[in-house]
Amino acid sequence: MISLYSWEVTVWTSCSASCGVGIQTRSVFCMRFMSIEQQDIQSVSEEECKEFKPPILQPCNQVDCPATWETEPWQLCSQTCGGGVQVRKVYCKQLLSTGAYRTLGDSNCRGPKPATNRGCSNTDCLPFMAGGEWGKCSVTCGLGVQRREQLCRQLTTVGHLVTLDREECSGLSSPPLIRTCRMMTCPSSSEMCAVPSCGKEF
């Protein structure tokens, strides 16, 4: 009985990609043929086959792909409530037959460009205490005070700042409602006398 060892291969699989760089695979076995008629065969260790092992991988469809849009992940929302904005980068790229990518101008990509921004955090913010516009200084010269009104505010889903009833902000801390203000220096008593008899006793 004569024993022969030889490599046996299966057919190549379909290409993994239609362009760029695809891969085809196949199985390779070392087989033992027990008779000259080669009808009695047996799979054995690859060490038994002395000839060079046939490749199990090969590249396929090595052609440049058409340019396509490529998007990066969305960044974090600009706000946690009250209507924020998310942005992302969008590129027109082409996969080459070498496996490398090339960035092209937007006009090279077909179809509409994917959005680069979108709305997010579309919920009303919680109410908060705020102060209104500062009033006029209490004096026309020297050191005085300014006052402002206490307001209950809220940033809505669409980004509008609205005023609510004060009851909606019950228990919330308030910003300062009074502050000092300094006007021009008050004139001295001598500067206030405009006639020669001012300040003289008769």
Image: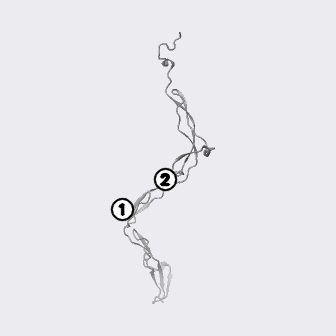
Tell me whether circle 2 and circle 1 mark residues in contact (CB < 8 Å): no
Q: Position of residue 146 (x, y in %)?
A: 55, 33
152 or 115, nearer to the observer: 152
Q: Position of residue 124 (x, y in %)?
A: 55, 51
Labelled disc at residue 45: none
2 or 1: mark nearer the eye: 2
Single out the residue that lies furthest toward the top.
202
197 or 51, nearer to the observer: 197
Q: Residues within 10 Å of mark 1 (few under 14, many from 20)?
A: some
Q: Position of residue 93 (x, y in %)?
A: 39, 62
Labelled disc at residue 85: 2
In the rendered view, would you say 118 is above or below 189?
below
In the rendered view, would you say 185 is above or below 151?
above
Residue lying at 47% horizontally and 79% vertically, measured from the top left: 29
Q: Position of residue 132 (x, y in %)?
A: 54, 39
Q: Residues within 10 Å of mark 2 (few under 14, many from 20)?
A: some
Q: Which residue is mark 1?
A: 108
66 or 17, nearer to the observer: 66
Distance Cα–Cα, label 2 vs label 1: 28 Å
Task: Answer with mark 2 or mark 1, whichever residue precedes in sequence.
Answer: 2
Amino acid type, callout 1: Asn
- Quarter residue 102 falls in: bottom left
The local secondary structure at tag 2 comes to strand
